[in-house]
C-alpha cells in the first residue's frame, strides 16, 4: 500500500481543470503540451486513487481508466471519451515530428467533457465510498 497525499491529488485535479479551461486557446507546442498533460494528469490521479483504495494493479494507461470505471469513479461514457484522446499519447511521445494538430485538437475538444467532469466524479467517489480511506495523508481537505 502507498500513502497518497491528498494535497497533491487536489492540486492535480485543479491542474486538470486549468488545462480544460485553456485548451480551446492553445496551438502548436502549447497544444501538444496541454494534450499530453491532460492525459498524464488524469492517469496520475487515477493511479493515486488505485493506490489509496488498494485496487488491482493497472497494466496500461487505458487500464487505469478501466479500473476507475469498474470501481465507479468515472462513468462508462467518460471512459470512452478518455479512450478517444489517449490514442494521441503515442503520437505525442513517439511520432512528435508529424502530429496532426487539427485532428488532435478536434478529438480533445469533442471529448473534453470527460476531463471537465473528472474532479466532480472523483469527489463523488470519495463521498460515496464506504471503505475507510487509510492511505491518504492530509485528510483535512474536503473531498
Image: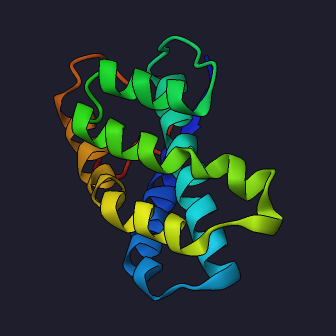
Q: Quadrant of residue 4?
A: top right
The spot of residue 41 in percent (x, y) is 56, 53
Q: Is residue 113 left or right of residue 47?
A: left
Q: Quadrant of residue 123?
A: top left
Instruction: Count every numbered label the image shows and give the total.
Output: 0
- Give the answer, above or below, for where 50 lies relative to 34: above
Is any atom of residue 25 visible in this view? yes
- Give the answer, above or below, for where 136 lies relative to 16: above
Q: Is residue 64 left or right of residue 95?
A: left
- Give the answer, above or below, for where 102 lies relative to 75: below
- Give the answer, above or below, for where 3 lies relative to 6: above
Depth check, front residue: 35 or 128:
35
**Residue drawn where x is 52% and y is 24% of the image:** 63
Is any atom of residue 135 visible in this view? no
The spot of residue 5 in percent (x, y) is 56, 43
**Residue drawn where x is 36% and y is 56% of the image:** 115
**Residue drawn where x is 38% and y is 28% of the image:** 68
Q: Quadrant of the N terminus?
A: top right
Depth check, front residue: 53 or 67:
67
Colouring scheme, one of rainbow, by chain, secondary structure, one colour: rainbow
**Residue drawn where x is 24% and y is 52% of the image:** 120
The spot of residue 32 in percent (x, y) is 65, 70
The spot of residue 11 in percent (x, y) is 50, 61
Residue, far top: 56
Amino acid at each position: 500500500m502507498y500513502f497518497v497525499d491528498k494535497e497533491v491529488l487536489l492540486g492535480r485535479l485543479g491542474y486538470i481543470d486549468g488545462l480544460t479551461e485553456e485548451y480551446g486557446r492553445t496551438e502548436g507546442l502549447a497544444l501538444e503540451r496541454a494534450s499530453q498533460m491532460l492525459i498524464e494528469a488524469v492517469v496520475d490521479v487515477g493511479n493515486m486513487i488505485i493506490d489509496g483504495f488498494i485496487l488491482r494493479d493497472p497494466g496500461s494507461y487505458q487500464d487505469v481508466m478501466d479500473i476507475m470505471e469498474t470501481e465507479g469513479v468515472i462513468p462508462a461514457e467518460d471512459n470512452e471519451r478518455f479512450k478517444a484522446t489517449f490514442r494521441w499519447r503515442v503520437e505525442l511521445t513517439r511520432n512528435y515530428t508529424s502530429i496532426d494538430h487539427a485532428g488532435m485538437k478536434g478529438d480533445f475538444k469533442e471529448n473534453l467533457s470527460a476531463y471537465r467532469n473528472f474532479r466532480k466524479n472523483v469527489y463523488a467517489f470519495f463521498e460515496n465510498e464506504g471503505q475507510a480511506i487509510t492511505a491518504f495523508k492530509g485528510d483535512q481537505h474536503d473531498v
